[in-house]
Image: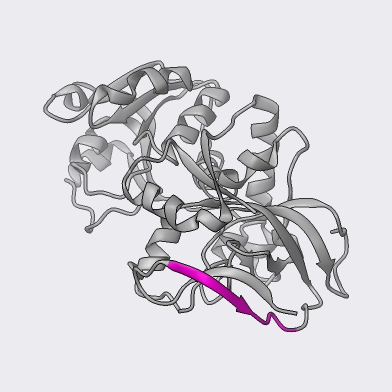
Amino acid sequence: MGIKAYAAKGPKQPLEPFEYEPGPLGPHEVEVKVSHCGICHSDLAMIDNDWGFSAYPLVPGHEVVGTIAAVGSDVDGAKVGQRVGVGWHCGSCGHCEWCNRGFEALCAQERATIVHHHGGWAESVRCDAKFAVPIPDAIESAVAGPFMCAGSTVFTPMARFGVKPTMRTAVVGVGGLGHLAVQFLAAFGCEVTAISSTHSKDEEARQMGATRFIATKGSDELKKAAGSFDFIISTVGADLPWGDYVAALRPQGRLVLVGIPESDLKFPAFPLLAEKSVSGGQCGGPTDTAAMLDFAARKEVRPVVEKFAMADVNKALDHLRAGRARYRIVLEA
């Protein structure tokens, strides 16, 4: 029996109803019946082939929430009816050094949910059973989806690079990723500064836990913050004055990029001699994501979402393309 979905037939094309035959369920796979699925800018990038490796027809959707409808013959632990989430990653080799250390996202054979694989804007989606992460009861399905990519993307480098309550931190960009990063850092007990082009999101950022706000457009507020931060996470997909952000770090501070800039980075090397670091980060594997979900449930971190019916996916995409989303969009089946 085929799986009904919504697919882009080519770059920058509107999504159309699409049905495909998934074939036999693999022995280590589960099939998840989709109740909700978020929309991420990575979905847009894949629809538009911005990264050059999209395959069409393409069924986007990698912030999946639903219940397990079927399990493979060798699956142990996952049960039919269990509520789970599926994020960017849907499989890995399971036996390399990275998988054995719980860093499945770094596996050379990592498989992505919407790269040569049909995603969650559909009736159901399949993944390796380990990548169907149980969702805590305290988190409602309607807001759980954005955690599976956006939440894991900002939380994983915080955990990986040892963010502590004593740190002075900053979040660049108060959007789909950034509004969760502000909440997580505040929940860690950190001092949090939100950084955006203007002060238009100042009040909202403070409500989410920021104690300070820097607006960069037409001001010297960022330059005045030189030597201020132990940890800066940039969530934006744009070119920025990276030298100013490295200058804003304290000695041994770290700048982490989880948004993908348009151009290669350029900044002076001399400031790095103060043991400053520039690192990348990405959505974590199932181990990281499970830890993030548990923390979010306990600390009451939640994404701000706007909901659309799955059938209105093109309206939802237009809303996102226009920059009107506050702050994540979730499709409801």
Can you tell which quarter of the image residue 94 is in? bottom right
Q: Which residues are drawn in magenta?
A: 15-23
Q: Residue 298, position in %: x, y?
A: 70, 28
Please tell me whether residue 19 belongs to the stretch shown in magenta: yes
Does residue 249 appear in the picture of this structure? no
Q: Name which residue lies at 64% across and 48% down.
A: 289
Residue 84 in picture, x, y percent from top left: 74, 52
Q: Is residue 312 above or below residue 222?
A: below
Q: Residue 80: in sight, yes or no?
A: yes
Magenta highlight: main SS: strand
Quadrant where the C terminus is found in the figure:
bottom right
- Say how many tags the image has: 0
Rendered location of residue 237, percent (x, y): 31, 50
For residue 278, above or below residue 252 = below
The quarter in which the N terminus is drawn is bottom right
Please state the horizontal and vertical placement of residue 103, each as a whole percent of the image.
61, 57
Direction from residue 58 to residue 301 in the image, left or right: right
Q: Is residue 128 left or right of residue 38?
A: right
Q: Residue at x 60, y 56 (%)?
A: 87
Is 202 above or below relative to 232?
A: above
Residue drawn at point x = 32 percent, y = 39 percent:
276
Q: Work out which residue is located at the far left of the displayed protein and give it.
A: 218
- On screen, residue 331 versus residue 102, left or right, reads left
